[in-house]
Amino acid sequence: MSNYQSPGLIRLPQPEPAQRLAPLYREAGLSAGQRALLRKYLRAMAVLYGVLPLSEARAIVVQQAPEVTGEQFDAFCAIALREEQPYCLVAAEQLFRHPPAGQDGALYLLSRELLTGDRLPQLLRAQQGTSRHVPERAPLLRWQDESYSEPTPQKRVLQRRLKELLPTVEDAAAALALAAVTVRRLPLDLGPLLRDLSQRAFLSKEEQRELIALLLDFYNNARIPAHCGHTPLEVGRTVVLDQKGDGAFLQLRSGKVGRNDPCPCGSGKKYKRCCGA
């Protein structure tokens, strides 16, 4: 039996109006600036990781934001349980039938979009045993925007091709934003994105296949929640397009890349001097 609870069983407190919570924040000694910063951090981590123990989120904030103490972080979260935000805070008992050792009563930070469907148990399973990638403060806070993705060479190539294939710059921007959201979801499913592209412009079979290859390059170099913010390339679990006859399918290619191995991105450099830098 799985140790993960169904997301449908997670019950959240009824959200309360901001004007009712504001006095509580002031009584806790939290300024408006501190509250705004903590909301930015929680939202960014919910986008980048999907789910993580609140204790880990606390450690990241205390290390990166000297203007907030650990006690202030705790006080904020005790009140933020009742806020309406894209993220939420849930007890370990709501995620696990048998919480991990030492996690009884602990809280987890969770993206609200994981409260529907079965992606939350899949994500928790996928993250097991993987260390967490923690960007510096400024790069981490850029993840507040759910359509954000790092400006990798693969993203620039995809962006340029979308601008060439789609009717307007706005169409290309919308498709790129959807691609950034799509690659973070588990399991990887390019179907909705390809249908969106087909609605925006007529694409030949060759152009569709080319875009799939570019999207997979983008995915393999994107930071995704399933790998705790690492890229598939960094953990050695990339996806490739495998051609079979007249059809094509996606295939997982496992095996961690050695630091002195040629970089799989095709640059010709060693991995440690390219994507592994």
Image: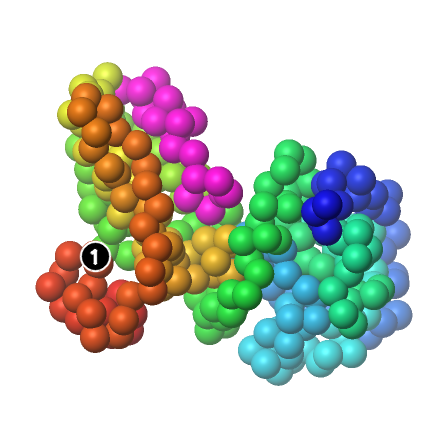
> Amino acid type of disc 1?
Cys
Q: Which residue is disc 1 drawn over?
A: 265
Residue sticking out furthest to the left: 268
Is 96 within the magenta?
Answer: no
Q: Horizontally, is 166 left or right of 48 in the view?
A: left
Q: Horizontally, is 79 left or right of 202 in the view?
A: right
Residue 246, compared with residue 274, is above or below; it is above
- From the top left corner, tell me how far across and down residue 64 is, in percent: 56, 78
- From the top left corner, tell me how far across and down residue 112 is, in percent: 67, 44
Quadrant housing residue 74: bottom right
Q: Which residue is rendered at x = 79% and y = 52% of the image?
A: 97
Which of 199/255 is in front? 255
**Main SS of residues in magenta:** helix
Residue 96 at least partly seen: yes
Q: What span is in magenta?
A: 183-201
Residue 264, compared with residue 56, is above or below; it is above
